[in-house]
């Protein structure tokens, strides 16, 4: 195992309350990310340094590119679509009092796998749901507490998932129709090392996971062995994704919510140049 504590750079110095969901958009050459609790969608262009910030009407847990242009949003009350002309419409609206959207990911078949959680983080109060491009919804997991990182192996035969309070990264087998079965642990985060939050999978099939209250991002091999740790000065690392034109830069979102004396970089977007080699992510087919 290798470890490093100084390899990161600051991509965007800001004070997001709950920075989350980094996603590289190859169509625009920009990184998408968000601040859940301040209802803001951010973009960052690493080539020019240009940033944009868009406010949403509800707390937003995830944002992903759409195949036809525009964005899909995992909002408090369901799944929303932003068209290329900035027109908003609901794809699937299902408000549940006390619950909001959280992390989401797009599967190799273009479906959106969107998680939810209760604001009070009540045990079993969240879900993981699969949405197709026409808005059809299928609940995959209905006993989730804090639905977080979801990702697929490069060949699409495995899916990785983290329900944060379990302290585990789980792995599923993926069938030909895209459905999953055979849930089992890949790796467990030991006491005192934090909690698994957002994750991504690299071209070697290794799983990178951000550690909430762990001040680090870890890489696990497909067999579950820990082989790399990148330590950071901010305790609440929330998610990770490969970006840049060659998908070799690892972007990390962070949070400052709940910290009595947050580090000056808490809430910023960080990047580890040349961390590895990512896999191009599909756009939502809706």
Image (cartoon, grey):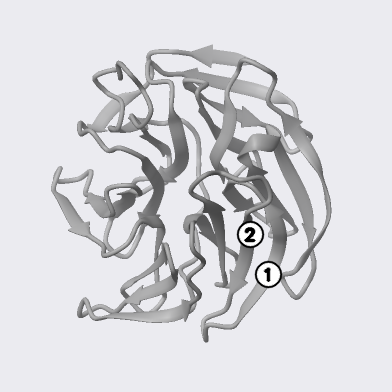
- In the drawing, what numbered circle is on residue 139? 1
Which badge, 1 or 2, is on the more N-terminal residue? 2
Counting the numbered discs, the total is 2
Quadrant assignment, res 142: bottom right
- Give the SS element for disc 1: strand
Residue in view at x 21 percent, y 59 percent: 55
Residue in view at x 51 percent, y 57 percent: 104
- Taking the image as shown, residue 98 lies to the left or right of residue 33, namely right
The x, y position of residue 149, in whole percent, is 57, 46
Q: Taking 283 as reference, is 119 above or below it?
A: above
> Among all residues in the image, which is located at the extreme front?
97
Residue in view at x 59 percent, y 22 percent: 228
The x, y position of residue 29, in whole percent, is 28, 56
Q: Taking 251 as reference, is 51 above or below it?
A: below
> Among all residues in the image, which is located at the extreme bottom?
134
The x, y position of residue 75, in whole percent, is 41, 63
Of 160 and 222, which appears nearest the observer?
160
Q: Which residue is mark 2?
A: 127
- Taking the image as shown, residue 46 lies to the left or right of residue 234, namely left
Q: Taking 266 as reference, is 116 above or below it?
A: below
- In the drawing, what numbered circle is on residue 29? none
The x, y position of residue 67, in whole percent, is 41, 75
- Give the SS element for disc 2: strand
Task: State which quarter of the image contains the N terminus.
Answer: top right
Q: Taking 71 as reference, is 151 above or below it?
A: above
Kindly check if marks 1 and 2 are in contact, taking CB atoms under 8 A apart as contact.
yes
**C-alpha distance separating marks 1 and 2:** 7 Å
Of 132 and 271, which appears nearest the observer?
132
């Amino acid at each position: 195992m290798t470890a490093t504590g100084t390899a990161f750079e600051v991509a965007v110095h800001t004070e997001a309350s709950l920075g989350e969901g980094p996603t590289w958009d190859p169509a625009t050459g920009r990184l998408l990310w968000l601040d859940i609790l301040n209802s803001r969608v951010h973009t960052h262009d690493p080539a020019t340094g240009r940033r944009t910030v868009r406010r949403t009407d509800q707390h937003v847990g995830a944002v992903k590119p759409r195949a036809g242009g525009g964005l899909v949003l995992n909002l408090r009350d369901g799944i929303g679509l932003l068209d290329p002309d900035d027109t908003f419409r609901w794809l699937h609206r299902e408000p549940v009092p006390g619950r909001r959207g959280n992390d989401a990911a797009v599967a190799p078949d273009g479906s959106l796998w969107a998680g939810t959680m209760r604001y009070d983080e009540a045990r079993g109060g969240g879900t993981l749901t699969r949405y197709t491009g026409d808005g059809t919804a299928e609940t995959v997991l209905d006993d989730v507490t804090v639905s977080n990182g979801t990702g697929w192996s490069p060949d699409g035969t495995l899916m990785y998932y983290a329900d944060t309070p379990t302290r585990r990264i789980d792995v599923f087998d993926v069938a030909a129709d895209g459905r999953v079965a055979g849930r089992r642990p890949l790796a467990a985060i030991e006491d005192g090392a934090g909690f698994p939050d957002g994750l991504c999978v690299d071209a070697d099939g290794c799983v990178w996971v951000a550690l909430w209250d762990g001040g680090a991002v870890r890489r696990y091999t497909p067999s579950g062995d820990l082989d790399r740790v990148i330590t950071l000065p901010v305790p609440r690392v929330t998610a990770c994704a490969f970006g840049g034109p060659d998908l070799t830069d690892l972007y990390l979102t962070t949070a400052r919510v709940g910290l009595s004396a947050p580090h000056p970089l808490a809430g910023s977007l960080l990047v580890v140049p040349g961390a590895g080699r990512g896999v191009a992510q599909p756009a939502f087919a809706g």
